């Protein structure tokens, strides 16, 4: 039998090097983590990325602005609408377009629904990571309701291409309010049910409490954002601290953790689902009539210049840096992907953890490889 | 040994093999349906009426699949491992009675034989892990060895408690002893220890650590495919069924408790039905646990086994011995055992709730954050360090 070993410098014993991924059921895509273990303890770890690299940023440079929206769909393929929004906001900012009120509200409603769907996916998959096979089916039941609503609005279950530069693609279906109401009622019950299913389970707590903890200061140093950062006790939510779109009009809470361990990262997301539902309710209540898109040419040609826009995607700080040279296609599109930045803290979180914890820690960052590799 | 004796032995083996295989087929279907119910699904519905032919389709698929031998695998060990797991699982059935009349060979040392044979399957798992030449498989094999050997102790101790009560190692005799009161009522603690350690022996949730899909990707079985994999699978389900039957025989009174007034043919038929009903109840419990709980970590598993189950199983023996030695009535044992069981559950709960603070996530109102003109996230967070 062939085993590749590396010698442990401290005591001369031999550590086992294990390749976790790119084909491993719990690396959430094609992520490769090389770990050196001493028994079940992890001595050292080394993340390798790039298995899903499609050169999206480079392709952006040869596409029209309106075509790029579809490329953004395929980056964060679980939070598509949030991804689309980031690019559209950047383009609108550089062109100085004023988006109609109704479009803004529609965007917020859909993006928050998307956040709930994304967190639901996380919730279910996290249960699987912990070895419980039931949560994912409950989570998908809820997610399915949201996906159906998306289908009725955007025509697609994923890869919506619905948020466009200057507004949204088309108006909401006539019975949208009623459908949304039904979905929200389901969701409220569903979130509580999901919470009761696993969050209070002692074995789940024992598995996640104190595992993969990272302090707030360290998290900031690593560039961790989103729920993972808030779990470490840092109050930072771009929807509030650097508001975009119309997020400054809504009243909601920011869930903040204490220890930055897997449990906090898990529960912050559960709480965030509840808060998102609050935002959607407020937005649906205030949803005005009117135009759904500003008058924007089909092929937009922004003036020369550069912008930087930050948004809060389900995974964290999704920022777009856009440089325009005044032509139909952008000169450069740089995406600051939250998954990529959050991944950087993985090595520190894995220090001294057990092999079984590695799965949970990796899961708690909620990676989307499409976004990491772009 | 005459030719007819050989023939009888062979016939018994074939009948046993067929009936156990049939049980496994039913069991896979039952588990899928049970899990589906828990998870708001339908389970298999397509193949045959209500999907009852699904296990047949699955087994056909498995048999016709290609057997893959990894390049670096240790051939002999790799091919022998499934058999090393399967044979002990099968051998256990030699002495397990399903009614007073239906048993391959009723041994006087039946229980002793069962515990001795059941340990052998660890060898097969280790062989599978080592022979596959995959690090994940080695990891899984070692996990299996550690887990199975540590849980063997409380498992055997719990069985010993029953043997002391019945004053016999003969399973038929043990069942007969329970005609007035089942040992589950006399030794609730014993039942708890037995079921918990049996789950660990089987490698079922929450102790499915050695073949955890999300961690070691199937552990020792990761490189196996087709027929050889299905032999592991067969052995696993066979063991599950064996454990359920043993639970019924040792603790739930088998066919004799609470009542079995008939004799002759009627006795055999009704006993079998009675046993199967009780067994399904135990199996349902095992499936239910699988649908409910996440997996423990290996160190938590070991701590649970060595720090809680092993001492408890010794205590179980001690109280049984005291009661039997002084000839005290059995209800005294029930009380003692019950108190210990409640105490154990309290210890588990206290341990987990004291070390775990649940409300670590607090809500910060967006309004408060907005009202601060210059906001420094770390300052107001309080618990950042």
Image (spheres, helix red, strand yellow):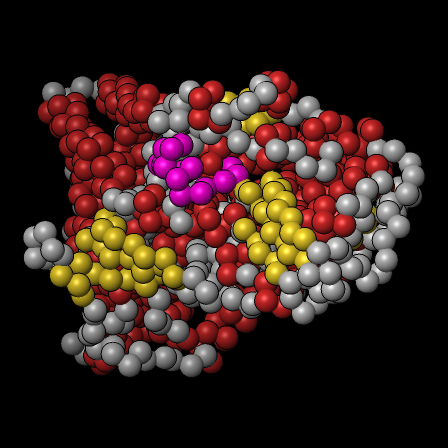
Q: Quadrant of residue A261?
A: top left
Q: Quadrant of the C terminus of chain B?
A: top left
Q: Which residues are magenta?
A: A213-227
Q: Residue at x 22, y 32 (%)?
A: B308
Residue B23 seen in this snapshot: no
Residue B309 is situated, as x and y percent measured from the top left of the image, at: 23, 35
The residue located at (14%, 27%) in the rendering is B318
A68 or A334: nearer the viewer:
A334
The reply to whether residue A284 is visible in this rendering is yes
Q: Is residue B372 left or right of residue B85?
A: right
> Residue at 37% of width from left, 48% of height from top?
A346
**Left or right: A185, with A35 as reference point:** right
Residue, x 75% and y 30% (percent of image)? A281
Q: Is residue A303 or residue A314 the one in the foreground?
A: A303
Q: Is residue A155 left or right of residue B198?
A: right
Left or right side of A90 for B138: left
Q: Is residue A214 magenta?
A: yes
Instruction: State the image coordinates of residue A355 (x, y, percent, origin top left).
Output: 30, 50
Please name whichever residue, B77 or B158, is drawn nearer the observer in this view of the structure.
Answer: B77
Is residue A274 placed above or below B217 in the rendered structure? above
Placement of B302 over or under A259, stated as above or below: below
Q: Position of residue B214 (x, y in %)?
A: 41, 54
């Amino acid at each position: 039998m062939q085993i590749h070993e590396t010698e442990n410098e401290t005591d001369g014993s031999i550590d086992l090097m294990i390749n976790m991924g790119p084909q491993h059921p719990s690396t959430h895509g094609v992520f490769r983590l090389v770990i050196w273990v001493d028994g079940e303890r992890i001595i050292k770890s080394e993340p390798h990325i790039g298995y899903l690299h499609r050169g999206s940023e480079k392709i952006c440079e040869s596409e029209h602005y309106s075509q790029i929206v579809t490329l953004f769909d395929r980056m964060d393929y679980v939070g598509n609408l949030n991804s689309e929004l980031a690019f559209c906001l950047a383009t609108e900012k550089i062109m100085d377009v004023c988006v109609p009120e109704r479009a803004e509200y529609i965007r917020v409603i859909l993006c928050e629904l998307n956040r709930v769907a994304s967190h639901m996916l996380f919730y279910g998959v996290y249960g699987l990571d912990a070895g419980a096979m039931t949560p994912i089916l409950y989570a998908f039941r809820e997610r399915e309701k949201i996906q159906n609503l998306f289908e009725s609005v955007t025509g697609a279950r994923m890869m919506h291409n619905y948020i466009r530069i200057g507004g949204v693609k088309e108006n909401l279906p006539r019975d949208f309010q009623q459908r949304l109401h039904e979905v929200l009622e389901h969701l409220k019950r569903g979130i509580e049910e999901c919470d009761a299913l696993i969050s209070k389970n002692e074995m789940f707590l024992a598995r996640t409490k104190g595992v993969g903890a990272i302090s707030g200061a360290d998290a900031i140093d690593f560039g961790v954002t989103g729920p993972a950062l808030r779990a470490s006790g840092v109050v930072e939510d771009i929807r509030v601290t650097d508001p975009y779109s119309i997020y400054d009009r809504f009243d909601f809470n920011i869930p903040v953790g204490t220890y930055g361990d897997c449990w906090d990262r898990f529960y912050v997301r559960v709480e965030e689902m509840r808060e998102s539902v609050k935002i959607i309710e407020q937005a649906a209540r205030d949803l005005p009539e009117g135009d759904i898109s500003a008058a924007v040419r089909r092929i937009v040609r922004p003036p020369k210049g550069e912008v930087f826009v930050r948004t809060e995607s389900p995974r964290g700080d999704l920022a777009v840096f856009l440089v325009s040279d005044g032509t139909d296609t952008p000169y450069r599109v740089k995406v600051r992907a939250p998954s990529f930045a959050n991944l950087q803290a993985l090595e520190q979180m894995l220090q001294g953890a057990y092999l079984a914890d590695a799965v949970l820690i990796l899961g708690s960052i909620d990676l989307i490889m499409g976004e990491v590799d772009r | 040994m005459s030719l007819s004796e050989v023939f009888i032995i062979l016939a018994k083996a074939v009948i046993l093999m067929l009936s156990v295989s049939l049980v496994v087929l039913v069991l896979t279907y039952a588990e899928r349906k049970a899990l589906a119910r828990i998870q708001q699904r339908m389970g298999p519905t397509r193949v045959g009426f209500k999907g009852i032919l699904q296990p047949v389709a699955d087994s056909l698929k498995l048999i016709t699949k290609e057997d893959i031998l990894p390049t670096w695998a240790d051939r002999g060990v790799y091919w022998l491992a499934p058999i090393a797991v399967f044979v002990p699982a099968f051998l256990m059935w030699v002495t397990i009675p399903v009614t007073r009349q239906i048993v391959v060979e009723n041994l006087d040392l039946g229980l002793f034989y069962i515990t001795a044979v059941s340990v052998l399957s660890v060898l097969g798992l280790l062989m599978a892990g080592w022979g596959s030449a995959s690090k994940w498989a080695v990891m899984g094999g070692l996990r299996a060895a550690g887990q199975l050997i540590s849980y063997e102790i409380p498992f055997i101790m719990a069985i010993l408690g029953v043997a002391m009560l019945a004053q016999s190692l003969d399973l038929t005799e043990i069942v007969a002893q329970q005609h007035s009161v089942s040992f589950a009522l006399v030794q609730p603690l014993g039942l708890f220890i037995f079921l918990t350690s049996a789950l660990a022996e089987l490698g079922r949730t929450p102790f499915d650590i050695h073949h955890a899909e999300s961690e070691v990707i199937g552990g020792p079985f990761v490189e196996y495919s087709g027929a050889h994999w299905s032999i592991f699978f067969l052995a696993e389900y066979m063991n599950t069924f064996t454990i359920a039957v043993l639970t019924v025989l040792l603790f739930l009174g088998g066919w004799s408790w609470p009542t079995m007034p008939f004799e002759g043919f009627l006795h055999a038929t009704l006993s079998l039905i009675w046993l199967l009903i009780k067994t399904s109840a135990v199996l349902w419990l095992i499936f239910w646990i699988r649908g409910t709980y996440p997996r423990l970590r290996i160190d938590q598993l070991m701590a649970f086994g060595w720090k809680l189950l092993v001492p408890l199983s010794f205590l179980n023996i001690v109280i049984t011995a005291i009661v039997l030695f002084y000839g005290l009535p059995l209800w005294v044992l029930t009380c003692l055992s019950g108190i210990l069981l409640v105490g154990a559950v309290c210890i588990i709960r206290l341990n987990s709730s004291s070390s775990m603070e649940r409300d670590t996530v607090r809500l910060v109102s967006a309004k408060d954050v907005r009202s601060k003109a210059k906001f420094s996230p770390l300052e107001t967070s309080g618990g950042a360090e």
